[in-house]
Amino acid sequence: MASHLLVMGETLIDLVPGPNGREAVLGGSPYNVAIGLGRLGASVGIASSLSTDADGQRFKAALTADGVDLSYVAFSDAQSPTALVEVGTTESGPRYVFTLAGTAFDVPPALPPLLPDGLRHIHVGSFSTLVPPMAGTVFNALTEAKGHRTTSYDPNIRPMITPDKAKARADVEKLVALVDLVKASEEDMEWLYPELAPQDAIKAWLKHGPKLAILTRGAKGADAFTETGHLSVPAPAIKVQDTVGAGDSLMSSLLFAMDRDGALGVGHTAWTPASIERWLSFAVRASAYTCTQKGSNPPRLSDLN
């Protein structure tokens, strides 16, 4: 595999409200992150599973069109998984109802035990990191990555899939302990740790191992936390079309900005307050752009320039 960055997680069809009923839109947080990185020009691949049905072929075509490498994709004759999306407000975000059983979601990605040395960063995300069969693959990949490449994690909590809060929290914390960078939304942290303010909860994660924690705050922008400090980046004023994919766009653009500055991989450049603010400002701007679009439609560099 020639890609320098690898995204691991699910792909699924988002059934979103449209003018003539429901529209079938390509989605899944990891898919969105991979597409976002590809559109910005990053060297990226995805480790996931795709159906051979018509929707799976749409996924394959879209990923290929945006330059995402499919070397670690597994293909299944089972149908594509779906998520029924109810678009929420700027503050609440969208809501989802999932159909996963008996779909291509049941198939693990085609990931070898040892990944190539040229791969410098792995990003994992969403509920597939907590649900078999992907959960085991993710844990093994992050464990193997220690000392060989940098890693990041976005739990992107979906309570309908992981309703046991205590177990979900324990499983999330196991993954947090394995990564260098973690990103979560205020909504994620409020569900996982209702007894804590989101800022306090995510700062506590830094004690488990990550060097950088990002808290997204919707229309209020995003905060970055390290062991030695904290900074905030406000969101630009925009006319919101919807918020689907906003957090994924922030994640992909953050990783792109870091990679562009040589800040990912073994021997990466320092993550200083000035550089973190620069990367996060770029990411917040990309996320805001996505909120002006219908569905998850992350920007290209030309859109941000």
Image (tube, helix red, strand yellow):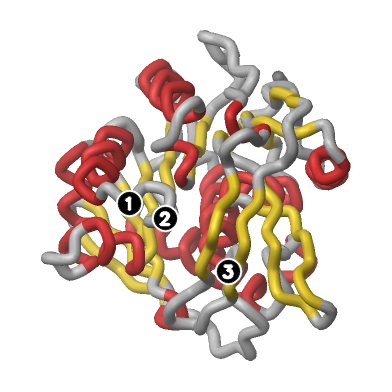
Task: Give the amino acid at mark 3.
Answer: Ser
Of discs 3 and 2, which sits in the foreground? 2
Count up the numbered dots.
3
Between residues 157 and 44, which one lies in front from this camera angle? 157
| Callout 2 secondary element | loop
The answer to whether residue 103 of the structure is visible from this angle is yes
Residue 60 occupies which quadrant of the picture? top right
Please name the residue that numbered disc 3 is placed on: 287
Please name the residue that numbered disc 2 is placed on: 160
Q: Going by the image, does 208 lie left or right of 12?
A: left
Q: CA distance from mark 3 to mark 2?
A: 25 Å
- Tell which residue pokes out farthest to the top in this image: 113
Task: Give the amino acid at mark 2.
Answer: Met
- Tell which residue pokes out farthest to the front in this image: 102
Give the quarter of the figure containing the C terminus. bottom right
| Callout 3 secondary element | helix
Residue for point 74% across, 25% down: 76
x and y percentages locating residue 123 in the rendered image = 50, 38
Of discs 1 and 3, which sits in the foreground? 1
- Vertical placement of 303 versus 239: above or below? above
Task: Give the amino acid at mark 1.
Answer: Pro
Q: Going by the image, does 197 lie left or right of 89?
A: left
Q: CA distance from mark 1 to mark 3?
A: 28 Å
Please name the residue that numbered disc 1 is placed on: 163
x and y percentages locating residue 290 in the rendered image = 65, 71
The answer to whether mark 2 and mark 1 are in CB contact below 8 A is yes
Residue for point 84% across, 79% down: 20
Residue for point 78% across, 67% down: 23
